[in-house]
Protein backbone atom coordinates (compact mmCIF):
# COMPACT_ATOMS: atom_id res chain seq x y z
CA UNK A 1 0.00 0.00 0.00
CA UNK A 2 0.91 3.66 0.14
CA UNK A 3 1.34 6.14 2.98
CA UNK A 4 1.90 9.84 2.32
CA UNK A 5 2.62 12.37 5.06
CA UNK A 6 2.69 16.15 4.91
CA UNK A 7 2.20 18.84 7.57
CA UNK A 8 -1.40 19.85 8.11
CA UNK A 9 -0.89 23.60 8.27
CA UNK A 10 1.81 26.18 7.65
CA UNK A 11 1.95 29.95 7.91
CA UNK A 12 4.34 32.28 6.09
CA UNK A 13 4.77 35.97 5.35
CA UNK A 14 4.19 37.67 2.03
CA UNK A 15 7.44 37.91 0.08
CA UNK A 16 9.12 35.11 2.01
CA UNK A 17 10.07 31.55 1.01
CA UNK A 18 8.30 28.45 2.29
CA UNK A 19 9.12 24.76 1.95
CA UNK A 20 6.37 22.13 2.21
CA UNK A 21 7.66 18.62 2.87
CA UNK A 22 6.17 15.31 1.83
CA UNK A 23 7.33 11.83 2.79
CA UNK A 24 5.96 8.66 1.29
CA UNK A 25 6.13 4.89 1.58
CA UNK A 26 4.95 2.97 -1.42
CA UNK A 27 5.04 -0.53 -2.81
CA UNK A 28 5.48 0.81 -6.34
CA UNK A 29 6.55 4.33 -7.33
CA UNK A 30 6.16 5.97 -10.73
CA UNK A 31 6.34 9.69 -10.11
CA UNK A 32 5.39 12.34 -7.58
CA UNK A 33 3.03 15.24 -8.23
CA UNK A 34 2.21 18.48 -6.45
CA UNK A 35 -1.19 20.12 -6.83
CA UNK A 36 -2.60 23.41 -5.56
CA UNK A 37 -6.20 23.65 -4.40
CA UNK A 38 -7.97 26.86 -3.39
CA UNK A 39 -10.95 26.48 -1.08
CA UNK A 40 -14.00 25.26 -2.96
CA UNK A 41 -12.12 24.84 -6.22
CA UNK A 42 -10.60 22.06 -8.29
CA UNK A 43 -6.98 20.98 -7.71
CA UNK A 44 -4.58 22.31 -10.34
CA UNK A 45 -1.30 20.72 -11.38
CA UNK A 46 1.92 22.39 -10.20
CA UNK A 47 4.82 20.00 -10.74
CA UNK A 48 5.98 16.46 -11.50
CA UNK A 49 9.16 14.63 -10.45
CA UNK A 50 10.10 11.11 -11.46
CA UNK A 51 13.90 11.34 -11.20
CA UNK A 52 15.92 12.61 -8.24
CA UNK A 53 16.66 16.30 -8.15
CA UNK A 54 15.10 19.71 -8.45
CA UNK A 55 12.54 20.84 -11.00
CA UNK A 56 12.09 24.60 -11.23
CA UNK A 57 9.10 26.38 -12.69
CA UNK A 58 8.97 30.10 -12.02
CA UNK A 59 8.38 30.82 -8.32
CA UNK A 60 7.72 27.14 -7.63
CA UNK A 61 10.29 24.35 -7.40
CA UNK A 62 9.92 20.71 -6.44
CA UNK A 63 12.57 18.28 -5.23
CA UNK A 64 12.58 14.50 -5.09
CA UNK A 65 14.78 11.92 -3.38
CA UNK A 66 13.53 8.44 -4.24
CA UNK A 67 15.96 6.67 -1.88
CA UNK A 68 14.63 8.71 1.05
CA UNK A 69 10.98 8.69 -0.02
CA UNK A 70 11.01 12.46 0.29
CA UNK A 71 9.89 15.47 -1.69
CA UNK A 72 9.42 19.14 -1.04
CA UNK A 73 7.67 22.01 -2.76
CA UNK A 74 9.44 25.35 -2.51
CA UNK A 75 7.48 28.56 -3.01
CA UNK A 76 9.45 31.79 -3.41
CA UNK A 77 8.36 35.44 -3.26
CA UNK A 78 5.12 34.45 -1.60
CA UNK A 79 1.98 36.28 -2.62
CA UNK A 80 -1.35 36.46 -0.81
CA UNK A 81 -2.94 34.43 -3.63
CA UNK A 82 -0.64 31.51 -2.72
CA UNK A 83 -2.83 30.87 0.32
CA UNK A 84 -4.25 27.45 -0.55
CA UNK A 85 -3.90 23.74 0.13
CA UNK A 86 -0.92 21.97 -1.42
CA UNK A 87 -1.40 18.30 -2.18
CA UNK A 88 1.41 15.78 -2.61
CA UNK A 89 0.51 12.72 -4.69
CA UNK A 90 2.34 9.55 -5.66
CA UNK A 91 1.56 7.50 -8.75
CA UNK A 92 1.20 3.78 -8.21
CA UNK A 93 3.42 1.92 -10.68
CA UNK A 94 1.04 -1.05 -10.81
CA UNK A 95 -2.19 0.68 -11.82
CA UNK A 96 -1.21 4.29 -12.59
CA UNK A 97 -3.61 5.79 -10.06
CA UNK A 98 -2.55 8.83 -8.03
CA UNK A 99 -2.67 8.57 -4.23
CA UNK A 100 -2.88 11.90 -2.42
CA UNK A 101 -1.68 13.01 0.98
CA UNK A 102 -4.06 14.91 3.23
CA UNK A 103 -2.74 18.25 2.01
CA UNK A 104 -0.96 21.19 3.65
CA UNK A 105 -3.00 24.35 4.17
CA UNK A 106 -0.73 27.34 3.66
CA UNK A 107 -1.74 30.73 4.99
CA UNK A 108 0.18 33.72 3.69
CA UNK A 109 0.04 36.77 5.94
CA UNK A 110 0.84 40.39 5.02
CA UNK B 1 -10.80 22.71 -25.63
CA UNK B 2 -13.24 22.27 -22.76
CA UNK B 3 -11.86 20.94 -19.51
CA UNK B 4 -13.27 18.14 -17.40
CA UNK B 5 -16.99 18.74 -17.00
CA UNK B 6 -18.87 17.54 -13.96
CA UNK B 7 -22.56 17.82 -13.20
CA UNK B 8 -24.43 18.54 -11.17
CA UNK B 9 -22.22 20.96 -9.26
CA UNK B 10 -24.45 20.71 -6.23
CA UNK B 11 -26.85 17.89 -5.36
CA UNK B 12 -29.10 17.53 -2.33
CA UNK B 13 -30.60 14.15 -1.48
CA UNK B 14 -32.54 12.71 1.43
CA UNK B 15 -31.36 9.59 3.17
CA UNK B 16 -32.25 6.49 1.17
CA UNK B 17 -32.35 8.24 -2.22
CA UNK B 18 -29.94 7.69 -5.10
CA UNK B 19 -27.26 10.11 -6.28
CA UNK B 20 -25.85 10.08 -9.81
CA UNK B 21 -22.80 12.16 -10.59
CA UNK B 22 -21.61 12.61 -14.15
CA UNK B 23 -18.19 13.38 -15.58
CA UNK B 24 -17.13 14.12 -19.15
CA UNK B 25 -13.34 13.89 -19.55
CA UNK B 26 -11.24 16.28 -21.57
CA UNK B 27 -11.22 15.64 -25.30
CA UNK B 28 -8.74 12.94 -26.17
CA UNK B 29 -8.52 11.58 -22.62
CA UNK B 30 -9.31 7.92 -22.17
CA UNK B 31 -8.79 7.57 -18.41
CA UNK B 32 -11.15 8.75 -15.68
CA UNK B 33 -10.63 8.82 -11.93
CA UNK B 34 -13.08 9.55 -9.11
CA UNK B 35 -12.00 10.99 -5.76
CA UNK B 36 -13.93 11.94 -2.63
CA UNK B 37 -12.99 14.89 -0.45
CA UNK B 38 -14.33 15.75 2.97
CA UNK B 39 -13.88 19.31 4.33
CA UNK B 40 -10.32 20.05 5.43
CA UNK B 41 -9.12 16.67 4.12
CA UNK B 42 -7.22 15.36 1.13
CA UNK B 43 -8.51 13.54 -1.92
CA UNK B 44 -9.42 9.90 -1.29
CA UNK B 45 -9.08 7.65 -4.33
CA UNK B 46 -12.23 5.76 -5.23
CA UNK B 47 -12.00 4.26 -8.71
CA UNK B 48 -10.01 4.42 -11.97
CA UNK B 49 -11.67 3.58 -15.26
CA UNK B 50 -10.99 3.36 -18.96
CA UNK B 51 -13.73 3.13 -21.56
CA UNK B 52 -15.87 0.08 -20.69
CA UNK B 53 -13.29 -1.15 -18.21
CA UNK B 54 -12.63 -0.69 -14.47
CA UNK B 55 -8.88 -0.60 -13.88
CA UNK B 56 -8.80 -0.17 -10.11
CA UNK B 57 -11.76 0.09 -7.73
CA UNK B 58 -9.84 -0.53 -4.52
CA UNK B 59 -11.09 2.73 -2.98
CA UNK B 60 -14.78 2.12 -3.64
CA UNK B 61 -17.01 1.00 -0.77
CA UNK B 62 -18.21 -2.52 -1.49
CA UNK B 63 -21.86 -1.65 -1.08
CA UNK B 64 -24.05 1.10 -2.56
CA UNK B 65 -21.32 2.60 -4.76
CA UNK B 66 -20.74 1.82 -8.43
CA UNK B 67 -19.01 3.51 -11.36
CA UNK B 68 -19.02 3.10 -15.10
CA UNK B 69 -17.43 4.69 -18.15
CA UNK B 70 -19.39 3.52 -21.17
CA UNK B 71 -18.22 3.53 -24.76
CA UNK B 72 -20.44 6.52 -25.44
CA UNK B 73 -21.26 9.23 -22.94
CA UNK B 74 -19.91 10.42 -19.61
CA UNK B 75 -18.60 8.45 -16.68
CA UNK B 76 -21.19 7.94 -13.94
CA UNK B 77 -20.62 7.56 -10.21
CA UNK B 78 -23.74 6.12 -8.62
CA UNK B 79 -24.50 6.07 -4.92
CA UNK B 80 -27.57 4.11 -3.86
CA UNK B 81 -29.48 4.57 -0.60
CA UNK B 82 -27.39 7.56 0.43
CA UNK B 83 -26.54 8.17 4.08
CA UNK B 84 -25.39 11.37 5.80
CA UNK B 85 -21.78 10.12 5.75
CA UNK B 86 -21.84 10.25 1.95
CA UNK B 87 -21.96 14.06 2.09
CA UNK B 88 -18.74 15.23 0.45
CA UNK B 89 -17.26 16.77 -2.67
CA UNK B 90 -16.74 14.22 -5.43
CA UNK B 91 -14.03 15.12 -7.92
CA UNK B 92 -13.54 13.57 -11.30
CA UNK B 93 -10.22 13.77 -13.13
CA UNK B 94 -9.06 12.62 -16.54
CA UNK B 95 -5.75 11.94 -18.21
CA UNK B 96 -4.43 10.63 -21.49
CA UNK B 97 -2.60 7.32 -21.40
CA UNK B 98 0.48 8.00 -19.21
CA UNK B 99 3.67 8.15 -21.20
CA UNK B 100 2.00 8.79 -24.53
CA UNK B 101 3.09 11.86 -26.44
CA UNK B 102 5.68 12.64 -23.77
CA UNK B 103 3.06 13.66 -21.22
CA UNK B 104 3.53 13.13 -17.49
CA UNK B 105 0.17 11.48 -16.99
CA UNK B 106 -0.95 14.35 -14.79
CA UNK B 107 -4.59 14.44 -13.88
CA UNK B 108 -6.88 17.26 -14.93
CA UNK B 109 -9.65 17.83 -12.42
CA UNK B 110 -13.23 18.95 -12.81
CA UNK B 111 -14.83 21.49 -10.48
CA UNK B 112 -16.41 18.75 -8.39
CA UNK B 113 -19.92 17.74 -7.42
CA UNK B 114 -20.93 18.60 -3.88
CA UNK B 115 -23.38 16.11 -2.43
CA UNK B 116 -25.39 16.99 0.65
CA UNK B 117 -27.48 14.28 2.29
CA UNK B 118 -30.23 15.54 4.57
Image: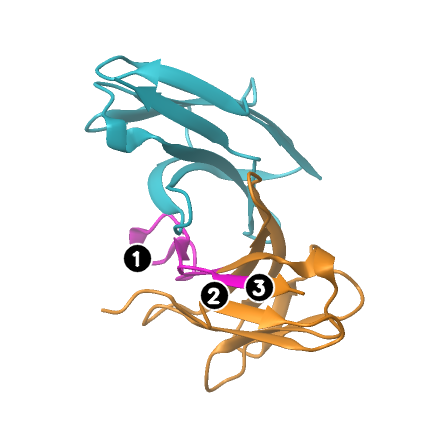
Chain colours: A cyan, B orange
Give the quarter of the figure containing the C terminus of chain B. bottom right
Which mark is on residue B31? 2
Q: Position of residue A71 (x, y in %)?
A: 47, 23
Secondary element under disc 1, as helix, strand or loop, is helix
The span shown in magenta is B92-115
Report which quarter residue A74 is drawn in. top left
Q: Is residue A56 above or below residue B83?
A: above
Q: Chain of mark 1?
A: B
For disc 1, the marked residue is: B101
Q: Position of residue A40 (x, y in %)?
A: 42, 49
B31 vs B72: above or below: above
Q: Numbered disc 3: what chain? A: B
Judging by the rendered image, the residue that carries numbered circle 3 is B115
Confirm whether residue A92 shows in the render.
Answer: no
**Mark 1 or mark 3, whichever is nearer to me:** 3
Q: CA distance from mark 3 to mark 2?
A: 23 Å
- Observer-side mark, 1 or 2, equals 2
Amino acid sequence: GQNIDQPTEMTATEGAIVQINCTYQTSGFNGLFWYQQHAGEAPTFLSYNVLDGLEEKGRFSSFLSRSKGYSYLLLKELQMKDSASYLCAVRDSNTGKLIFGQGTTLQVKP
Amino acid sequence: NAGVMQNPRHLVRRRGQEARLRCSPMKGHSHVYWYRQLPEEGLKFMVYLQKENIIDESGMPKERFSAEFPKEGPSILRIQQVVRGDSAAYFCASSPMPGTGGNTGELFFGEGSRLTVL
